Amino acid sequence: MKTIGFIGLGLIGGSIAKTIRKFHPDYHILAYARHRETLAAALKDGVINGVLEAEDGRYCTCDYIFLCAPVEHNIEYLKYLKDIISDQCIITDAGSVKGPIHEAVEELGLDHCFIGGHPMAGSEKSGYGNSTDHMLENAYYILTPGGQVSLEKLTEFSEFIDSLGAIPMVLSAEEHDFITAGVSHLPHIVASALVNLVNALDNDAEYMKTIAAGGFRDITRIASSSPVMWQQICMENSRNISSVLDEYIRMLIQIRCSIDNREADNLYQMFASSRDYRDSIDVSTTGLINKAYVLYLDIEDEAGGIAAIATILAMDKISIKNIGIIHNREFEQGVLKIEFYEEDAMKRGAALLKKRHYIIYER
């Protein structure tokens, strides 16, 4: 039996703790969080066995300690943990940028026992109340070991992450930050910039906003993420994001030149190559940007049509995240869009509606 310590028990920390409890019910889980009501809820749920203080002698009993607070707070906790942890303890974190904490780890002489972690999972919501015991399922979980971590410790921790239903992947901190700059951080910046551009170009009648449905809302969905979190990510990973932005800007300039010069072959190749590469991306695992679980279907334009569908799903205890009529169907099939919180709910909803002879279009 292992003892696991948590500092921070929000969406990610809470989900990791719940997943450990699910797969390792005999493990002893201790946690500290700034909000006492969070700890009370975790105790009531049976997720944790005991409550820790910010500075607590019981950290020395932990086999693993998960730092799930903001980066600057995690670094402060490292300074305390340095002198109290056991020789066998592995410290890890759950931050989306690895450079700053690895620099602190090296300065503190903890690179023999620190394995950075980044679960590629999350939600636009936050807090322990929104954490789940299946958030890590089939999600890549990046591990960035300190330079002096033994192969034995890395293997042990990687097998532990695998036991939680996640897919461990070992990278250096530098590799991680460059990769995430390209496939996570840049897309969020692009989505936010595109929304702001349309807002600036729109007229007083807001025609752009009125017809901006379907494809526009889908490709800019991530612009609804926490501005505080993305402000911090841009500050912490600025060098890599700036480098990737340079390449993106150069590509946009090339595209503009092709459009200005009416270079049909170049434009075709751009769309064809992007289509082929995107279609080759594996959709069976959870990536850095959360997947939307959406169904489209055709319904008759009659009173009670949407209510009937909502009732059918509710009777089977299927929760709906969002539902609404699509007025701009330039890129979509189906007039009604239903968004679910989870893939299982989407699949159950599709099967149920098909049995009722609705025509379903899945993405």
Image (tube, rainbow, N blue to C red):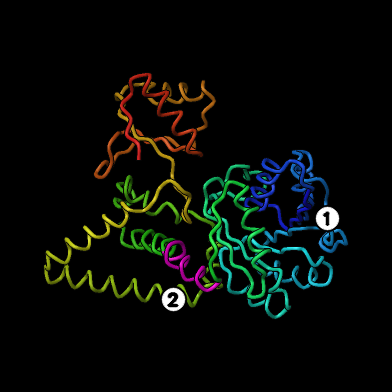
- Residues at marks 2 and 1 touching, judged by CB atoms closer than 8 Å: no
Residue 110 at x, y percent in the picture: 72, 74
The image quadrant where one finds the C terminus is: top left
Q: Is residue 226 above or below residue 293?
A: below
Which residue is depicted at the point 63% across and 75% down?
147
Which residue is depicted at the point 58% across and 69% down?
98
Q: Quadrant of residue 132?
A: top right
Q: Amino acid at mark 2?
A: Ser
Stretch of the chain drawn in magenta: 173-186
Closest to the observer: 151 or 215?
151
Which residue of the protein is positioned furthest toward the bottom in this rendering?
A: 107
Q: Is residue 72 above or below residue 340?
A: below
Residue 313 at x, y percent in the picture: 47, 25
Q: Is residue 178 located in the magenta-colored stretch of the structure?
A: yes
Q: Is residue 276 above or below residue 300?
A: below
Say whether disc 2 or disc 1 marks the residue closer to the N-terminus: 1
List the residue tagged with mark 2: 242
Q: Amino acid at mark 1?
A: Leu
